[in-house]
Image: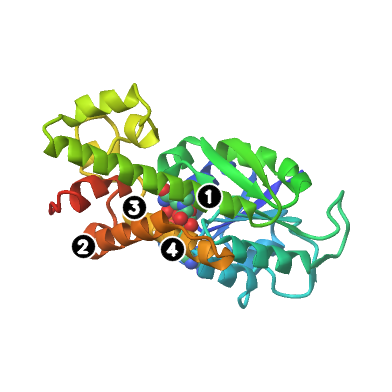
Amino acid sequence: QFESVGFIGLGNMGSRMANNLIKAGYKVVVHDVNCNVIKMFTDKGVPAKQTPFEVAEASDVVITMLPSSSHVLDVYTGPNGLLDGESRLRPHLFIDSSTIDPETSRKVSAAVSNFLLKEKKGFWEKPVMLDAPVSGGVLAAEAGTLTFMVGGSEDACLAAKPLFLSMGKNTIYCGGAGTGSAAKICNNLAMAVSMLGVSEALALGQSLGIEADTLTKVFNSSSARCWSSDSYNPVPGVMEGVPASMDYAGGFASKLMAKDLSLVAASAKAVGLKCPLTSQALEIYTKLCKDGHEMKDFSCAFRHYYFGKDE
Ligand code: NAD
């Protein structure tokens, strides 16, 4: 159904996702504010556009993968943005895969649905927006094994499935507009707290004389087993191939975790839910960033927060 795909935001994640769409045979056009990343695509013959508006004019579907809510608002509703003008021939579908707050996702989705299409195509009387953030990180973006959590129209989610499956291996429909973004920040809250819980327990264990790999074996055969203990262990040397065993390089930066926890805190405040663990985790990741570890993987909390070690 969709042949031409506009891709905006070619950073760590977006460049890899766009490459997988190209490999899958889609006609891709790209845009980014960073000329260096654009050159990586134009050098291999992929056309680039100067503005989001020009991307919209050239695409059946537009995918955005931007740092934060303000960038998404700018690209959609700013001057020369995706929604400039009053009606358009296309695109029929907008997919935002950035991690942003659910409120902004709903706002952008409403702005998209205020647009008219000049020609009806299938069930697309109006353009439709899906919030479809991802879990999996840079390696999964490269391998095309991301998980998409999708909010918005269920029909549009079904129609977009081939696109999602060109970039990922799982698509989970979460409900109406904003629920994909809600699922993503809830996932990252649970991940942050479980990482800190495992780190704190392993730090205490070491201080009480139990080797981290022995305590990890206990956890992984007992009720403390979780992703942070059995797949992404935070103690250097306990597991191969994880950031902890590579000086906490690569992986998911502490600054991104701090950003996501700020989104959680704002969303919890907006609905009046007390989230004491969110506040505590946000404080820890904010301190890690202030201490200069913002680019280290978020599992570095084990070394830098609990033992206060410098790099
Ligand atoms: P990044 O900073 O590497 O890339 C963002 C890109 O957007 C950059 O190339 C930047 O130049 C471009 N950009 C910024 N403003 C723009 C604008 N106004 N117009 C056009 N382009 C613009 O970020 P990333 O690591 O690729 O992450 C993107 C999103 O995915 C974030 O919301 C992040 O939280 C989320 N995410 C990241 C990971 C990860 O492991 N890196 C994992 C899951 C989700």
Sequence-earlier tag: 3 or 1: 1
Instruction: Tell me if label 1 and label 2 are in contact, CB under 8 Å.
Output: no
**Foreground label between 3 and 1:** 1
Residue closer to the observer: 260 or 3: 260
Give how far apart the Cα atoms at labels 1 and 2 are.
Answer: 27 Å
Q: Considering the numbered disc 4 on the image, is that residue within a helix, a strand or a loop? A: helix
Decide if ligand 1 comes within 8 Å of the CB at mark 1: yes
Residue that label 4 marks: 262
Type of the residue with mark 2: Asp
Label 2: how many residues lie within 10 Å, few (<14), some (14-19) or many (20+)? Answer: few
Instruction: Tell me if label 3 and label 1 are in contact, CB under 8 Å.
Output: no
Label 1: how many residues lie within 10 Å, few (<14), some (14-19) or many (20+)? Answer: many
Sequence-earlier tag: 3 or 2: 3
Sequence-earlier tag: 2 or 4: 4
Sequence-earlier tag: 4 or 3: 3
Give how far apart the Cα atoms at labels 4 and 3 are.
Answer: 15 Å
Sequence-earlier tag: 1 or 4: 1
Residue that label 1 marks: 184
Type of the residue with mark 3: Ala
In the picture, the quarter occupied by the N terminus is top right
